[in-house]
């Protein structure tokens, strides 16, 4: 469903509702997020940001466009090992300046190596965001 929606350029409302239920009813993160942001993409910028905005509205917390992709990098799945995956992301993201202190829900559509989330979370923490709570819509399998 995630792959299909990503290809179509918009995640369905069903995924937003499922994410709300996950956060509120099953995960119940502590501390509770007070704002939400997403991992930006230059290849597919609209679907993740749109999904995150709709999720923020339903969670009744603000969405801040806190991260920017400033350098194009190769897909993580093409990297040979963790060292190359991490190095591939060096300098790829920057904090936009729109940061709020407090726990932040960090959204991405797909997680492969988890390094993108790790780097994004580290940048937010370095900018004094507060705890970062990562949430991905799907995990990419090595065979995908």
Image (cartoon, helix red, strand yellow):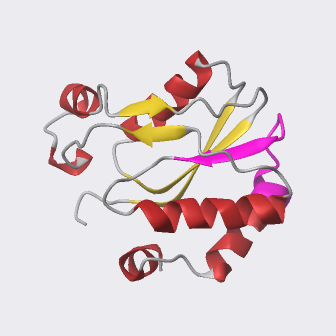
Q: Picture coordinates of residue 83 (x, y %)?
A: 22, 25
Q: Nearer the viewer, residue 134 or 54?
A: 54
- Residue at 76% x, 56% y is 23
**Residue in view at x 55 percent, y 59 percent:** 49
Quadrant location of the C terminus in the rendered image: bottom left
Residue 9 in the image: above or below residue 114: below
Which residue extends farthest front? 97
Within the magenta stretch, is there residue 110? Answer: no
Residue 15, by quadrant, is bottom right
In the image, 126: left or right of 26?
Answer: left
Q: Residue 14's quadrant in the figure?
A: bottom right
Residue 125 in view, yes or no: yes
Horizontal and vertical percent for residue 121? 54, 31
In the visual, does 14 lie left or right of 44? right
Quarter occupied by residue 79: top left
Whether residue 92 is situated above or below residue 65 in the rendered picture: above
Does the image show residue 33?
no
Which stretch is magenta?
23-38
Q: Position of residue 134 (x, y in %)?
A: 60, 43
**Total marks placed:** 0
Q: Nearer the viewer, residue 29 or 44?
A: 44
| Depicted 40 relative to depicted 66: above or below | below
Q: Position of residue 89 (x, y in %)?
A: 29, 32
36 within the magenta span: yes
Q: Report the residue at 34% width, 37% height from top.
A: 70
Foreground of the two, 63 or 5: 63
């Amino acid at each position: 469903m995630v792959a299909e929606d990503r290809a179509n350029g918009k995640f369905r409302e069903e995924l937003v509702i499922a994410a709300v239920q996950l956060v509120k009813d099953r995960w119940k993160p502590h501390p509770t997020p007070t704002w939400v942001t997403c991992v930006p993409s230059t290849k597919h910028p609209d679907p993740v940001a749109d999904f995150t905005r709709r999720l923020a509205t339903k969670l009744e917390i603000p969405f801040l466009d806190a991260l920017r992709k400033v350098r194009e990098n190769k897909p993580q799945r093409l990297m040979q090992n963790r060292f190359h995956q991490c190095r591939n992301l060096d300098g790829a993201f920057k904090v936009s300046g729109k940061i709020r202190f407090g726990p932040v829900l960090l959204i991405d559509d797909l997680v492969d190596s988890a390094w993108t989330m790790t780097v994004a979370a580290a940048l937010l923490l370095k900018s004094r965001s507060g705890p970062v709570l990562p949430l991905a819509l799907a995990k990419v399998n090595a065979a995908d």
